[in-house]
Amino acid sequence: MPFTKNILSIGAGYVGGPTMAVMADNCRQCAVNVVDIDADRIAAWNSGEPPFYEPGLKEVLQRALNRNLTFSTDVAAGIRDADIIFVSINTPTKTFGDGAGMAADLQYWEATARQIREHAGGDKIVVEKSTLPVRTAASMAGILNPKGGQIRFEIVSNPEFLAEGTAIRDLQRPDRVLIGGHQTGSGRNAVQEIVDIYANWVDPERILTTNVWSSELTKLAANAFLAQRISSINSIANICEATEADIDEVAKGIGMDSRIGPDYLRCSVGFGGSCFEKDILNMVYMCRYYGLDDVADFWHKVVTINSYQKDRFVRRMITAMFSSVVNKRIAVLGFAFKADTGDTRASPAIDVCRQLLEERAVVVVTDPQALPGARADLASFDGCVEYEEDPYTAAAGSHALAILTDWPEYRDLDYKRIYEAMEKPAFVFDGRNLLDHRTLHALGFNVYGIGKATLIH
């Protein structure tokens, strides 16, 4: 039976690959193709082994691969053959020029838009899947639909709301699917085409349609609100440490208020990942552009608190360990920015390890999935860092453990065995409040959590 639609994703990364795999799995009537200029990444997808770890992704991929899901480096052919093009490319923060450190770097996005116009050969629906500044669709339309153009492109915004570690579940059973389009006849038709795709597996009540600008802003605002909750609870955790309150008890009391709810009230060494800081800084830049300086200052403080949290964690380690970590072996348990992913982008572990290394500590990193990322992120300290797959080997002979990722398997380690193999006094700095602190203290550890009473001998 011939396919009814040809769907393309430009970009085979953390968004494009999983999204298209789930789409192909649920839309057998559609041909789904994913293109990327990274040949190694495409080869990994075609092998049936995803190029990164995400629970459930491998099974979904293998069901659809070479049935109605293909991966290729031929971007031009993919564009030419597609009816609908999802743009899932990276939009990092600018590192140069106006807006450096805040604004989104859209050079790759613009190059992709021009590539689409060059190779399209016919009318297309172009879907913004990447996180983009508000009103980017207007810029995309300016490139794709110049005056006198013979081909018509309809621009639709369909932002992703994926959390790494639960991305497949988020795609299969989303809280909502947001689709924004222009309020014209052709714009509404384009939105309906995207709605019809998702309706193959998503409850229609969870598919929300808006104008294109609302859709673009909602993505930034959602991440800003989530990050704000983390920075807010981290700031309360610091008060807990000063007043001997317990952050777990405070968070439970806050979370039982139906107006607030319990989600994103777990304090930690800080948030990471590819989205939160980037998207907030993008919004700060946008606010300053529109002259909303007080609004910009408000949101920028969310990022400031996050940086403070990481710095404070390291300062507490140094102070606790007799004001010096020089030549002290510190085992870092977890380098990914969260559990169930190998992604280290903006991971708090990067800043913590760099600061410890600058203090001349001996840092040993262990993580179930993120050691390749750790090696890349700490490459400038080559020769000063050890990498161990086995946490027991990492901990042996160390003066302290720093828990920086909430991998559940770290709860089940034999800490009596670890304590016996460590230098004394032995310290645990639990940056995720993952472990049972009283049990660790009973074993002999000096225990420092976030927003909790310090347990020392």
Image: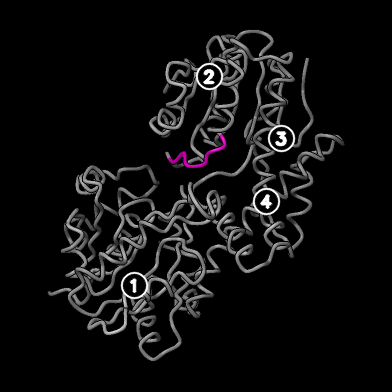
Q: Is residue 29 visible?
A: no
Q: Which mark is residue 450?
A: 3
Q: Which tag, 2 or 1, sits closer to the chain's start? A: 1
Please provide percent x and percent y for residue 167: 43, 54
Q: Of 429 and 132, which appears nearest the observer?
A: 132
- The residue wearing badge 2 is 363
Residue identified by numbered label 4: 302
- Disc 3 to disc 1, C-alpha distance: 49 Å
Residue 199, percent across and down? 38, 76
Residue 109 lies left or right of residue 229; in this view the side is left
Q: Residue furthest front?
A: 97
Most foreground residue, 185 or 133: 133
Q: Which residue is mark 1?
A: 143
The one nearer the camera, 158 or 246, is 158
At label 1, the amino acid type is: Ile
Q: Position of residue 87 (x, y in %)?
A: 34, 63
Q: How many marks?
A: 4
Q: Amino acid at mark 4?
A: Val
Q: CA distance from mark 1 to mark 4?
A: 34 Å
Asked which colour scheme the image uses, the reply is one colour
Mark 3: few/some/many CA within 10 Å (<14, 14-19, 20+): many
Q: Is residue 235 above or below residue 368?
A: below
Let me know if residue 345 is in the magenta part. Answer: yes
Q: Is residue 245 magenta?
A: no
Sequence-wise, the earlier of marks 3 and 1 is: 1
Viewer-nearest of labels 1 and 4? 1
N-terminal of the two: label 2 or label 3? 2
Q: Residue at x 17, y 70 (%)?
A: 81
For marks 2 and 4 on the same chain, the one whose residue lies earlier in the sequence:
4
Structural distance between the alpha carbons of marks 3 and 4: 18 Å
In magenta, the rendered stretch is 343-348
Vertical relation: 279 (above or below) 117: above
